[in-house]
Image (spheres, helix red, strand yellow):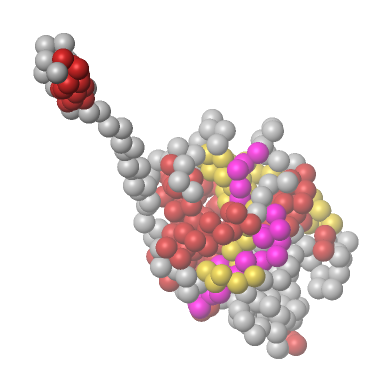
């Protein structure tokens, strides 16, 4: 009987102990503590203004062909510098001289606009700003020796970068952003050495504008503003920066631009990002129009006098510009 009573009492005490595991010294209970991870704040991404980017593209075309050693080239360069400074950027004019494949000295300038120069967490955006010195792909033999306006092949990429610069000024960002406009990109010879092309990016890659410059990644815009553009994943980008390219394409799709950013592998091409990757060792991708079924691999207007404002689409400018803005502000927030 005593044994049974002892067991019964022990059981009661044990149950009381369990029931009072949350008791305080005065016999009151406290609710169990739980840890919850606060949700990440939604990243506020500015709205890219496609009309502004279109206007900036038009203004460049209005200078005429931007071929090195011409008055239009110098005037347009001065306009870039003034515009970037008006948006609060620290601007560097990286002047250099190079020989063309014709053994001609080209007086050239890479324009570099820096935002948040004291921030070591940096990203680089780029486009070339010069235009082709002759229309070698034009059907009109009489016009082949004339320089082209380069509305898409040069001006559209710069137009979007100018709008991005404007947005950075309006909407502060905790990220160092460098916008580099490469000169003398389009002065090479078809069928010749690769190094006859992209002379400005080759020079910049060997003469970086900041000591110990190591941006996390880069994005190049080239022929990125035409109607019905089709951006595929080129071989150079996928070799050197596949993670960046896949993330950018994913963001574009999430924002409704999957009809522009095609999840398809493309072939190799010679463009500024090739030399940035290979010489400067900065992982840079290329957003460039690669139409399917094209004889040249580029738009029908490529290196012709058809590369004027008639090929530019505000919808394409918005798709690309808004995607790049999203990348910047997500990278700033640590969610890219």
Point out the residue furthest to the right here.
103
Q: Nearer the viewer, residue 105 or 91?
A: 91
Res 243 → quadrant: bottom right
Q: Is residue 71 above or below residue 113?
A: below
Is residue 235 located in the magenta-colored stretch of the structure?
yes
Q: Is residue 15 above or below residue 207?
A: above
Point out the residue furthest to the front here.
1
Q: Quadrant of the N terminus?
A: top left
The residue drawn where x is 38% and y is 44% is: 171
The residue drawn where x is 61% and y is 50% is: 218
Q: Is residue 257 left or right of residue 110?
A: left
Residue 13 visible, this orientation: no
Q: Residue 307, position in %: x, y?
A: 60, 76
Q: Residue 76, position in %: x, y?
A: 59, 57
Res 242 → quadrant: bottom right
The residue drawn where x is 70% and y is 88% is: 139
Q: Residue 86, position in %: x, y?
A: 46, 44
The residue drawn where x is 45% and y is 68% is: 257
- How many discs mark residues in the rendered view? 0
Q: Is residue 180 above or below residue 33?
A: below
Question: Which region of the structure is painted magenta?
Answer: 214-240
Q: Nearer the viewer, residue 132 or 294?
A: 294
Residue 98 visible, this orientation: yes
Is residue 237 located in the magenta-colored stretch of the structure?
yes
Q: Is residue 13 above or below residue 92?
A: above
Q: Residue 54, position in %: x, y?
A: 46, 66
Res 104 → quadrant: bottom right
Q: Is residue 14 left or right of residue 37?
A: left
Q: Nearer the viewer, residue 313 or 55?
A: 313
């Amino acid at each position: 009987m005593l044994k049974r009573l002892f067991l019964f009492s022990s059981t009661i005490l044990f149950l009381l102990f369990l029931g009072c595991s949350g008791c305080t010294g005065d016999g009151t209970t406290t609710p169990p503590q739980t840890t919850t991870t606060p949700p990440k704040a939604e990243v506020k991404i500015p709205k890219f203004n496609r009309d502004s980017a279109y206007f900036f593209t038009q203004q460049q075309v209005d200078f005429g062909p931007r071929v090195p050693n011409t008055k239009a080239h110098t005037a347009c360069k001065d306009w870039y510098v003034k515009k970037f400074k008006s948006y609060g950027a620290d601007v560097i004019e990286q002047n250099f001289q190079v020989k063309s494949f014709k053994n001609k000295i080209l007086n050239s300038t890479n324009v570099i606009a820096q935002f948040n120069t004291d921030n070591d967490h940096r990203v680089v955006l780029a486009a070339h700003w010069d235009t082709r010195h002759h229309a070698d792909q034009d059907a009109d033999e009489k016009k082949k020796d004339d320089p082209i306006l380069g509305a898409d092949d040069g001006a559209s990429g710069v137009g979007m970068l100018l709008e991005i610069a404007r947005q950075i000024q309006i909407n502060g960002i905790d990220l160092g952003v460098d916008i580099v406009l490469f000169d003398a990109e389009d002065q090479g010879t078809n069928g010749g050495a690769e190094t006859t092309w992209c002379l400005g990016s080759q020079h910049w890659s060997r003469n970086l504008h900041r000591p110990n410059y190591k941006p996390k990644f880069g994005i190049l815009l080239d022929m990125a503003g035409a109607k019905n553009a089709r951006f595929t994943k080129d071989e150079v980008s996928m070799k050197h920066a596949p993670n960046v390219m896949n993330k950018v394409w994913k963001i574009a799709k999430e924002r409704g631009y999957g009809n522009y950013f095609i999840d398809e592998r493309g072939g190799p091409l010679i463009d500024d990002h090739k030399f940035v990757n290979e010489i400067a060792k900065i992982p840079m991708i290329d957003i460039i129009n690669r139409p399917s079924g094209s004889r040249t691999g580029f738009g029908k207007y490529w290196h012709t006098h058809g590369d004027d404002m008639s090929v530019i689409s505000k919808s394409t400018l918005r798709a690309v510009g808004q995607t790049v803005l999203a990348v910047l502000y997500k990278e700033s927030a640590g969610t890219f």
